[in-house]
Image (cartoon, helix red, strand yellow):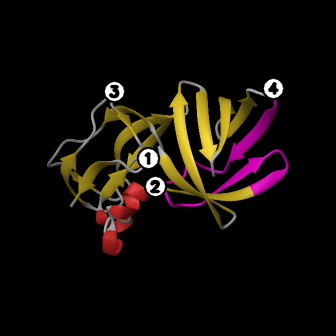
Amino acid sequence: MKLIAAVDGTKHSLVLRREGARATAEIDGRRYELEARETEAGSYLLLSDAGRVFECRVSSAPATSQPAEVQVGAQLYEVTLIDPKRLRGVAGGAGGPASGRVAASMPGKVVRVLVEVGAHVEAGDALLIVEAMKMQNELKASKDGAITEIHAQAGQTVNAGDVLIVVE
């Protein structure tokens, strides 16, 4: 998956590939191979092939384009992930939080879809559950309305920025 990572305001090209607990990250052309182990919610140990170990804490699992505080060792960073494919699909500001498009915030697997097409939902209602990095995340409606489209089913693998449900 190709992303743009803004780290403390500086943008970097980021290509991620994940196979189970193993991840390959290419940042501005430099390749890193890591194994990620979640020690508790929001805390990870990153093990490099070179034998180095990094402790990493993430303030939350943010939606794409929302900043998160990431602490690696003693260093604190503000990180924003941007999916260029998603930006192309939201010209003129459409597709933002008030649009009713519910998108995956990171790659993962759909565990359960909690609604059906035609169901009425209110802002904040849980719509589906996606498992990412061994954590289950509820994706919620950003506005009141009816479910008009469902693009996900249980067991499906999704990428960051994929529109999963539309509320109109």
- SS of the residue under disc 2: loop
The x, y position of residue 103, in whole percent, is 37, 51
- Identify the residue under disc 3: 155
Residue 127, disc: none
In 3D space, how far apart are the residues under numbered discs 3 and 4 (Cα atoms)? 34 Å
Query: Along the line of sight, which residue is nearer the eye, 10 or 149?
Result: 10
- Identify the residue under disc 4: 51
Give the quarter of the figure containing the C terminus: bottom left
Tag 1 near tag 4, CB within 8 Å: no
Disc nearer the start of the sequence (3/1)? 3
Q: Residue at x 57, y 49 (%)?
A: 14
Discs 3/4, front: 4
Query: Along the line of sight, which residue is nearer the eye, 49 or 86?
Result: 49
Q: Which residues are magenta?
A: 52-76
Q: Residue at x 64, y 37 (%)?
A: 41
- Identify the residue under disc 2: 83
Discs 3/1, front: 1
* Amino acid under disc 3: Gly
Tag 3 near tag 4, CB within 8 Å: no
The x, y position of residue 150, in whole percent, is 22, 44
Disc nearer the start of the sequence (1/4)? 4
- SS of the residue under disc 4: loop
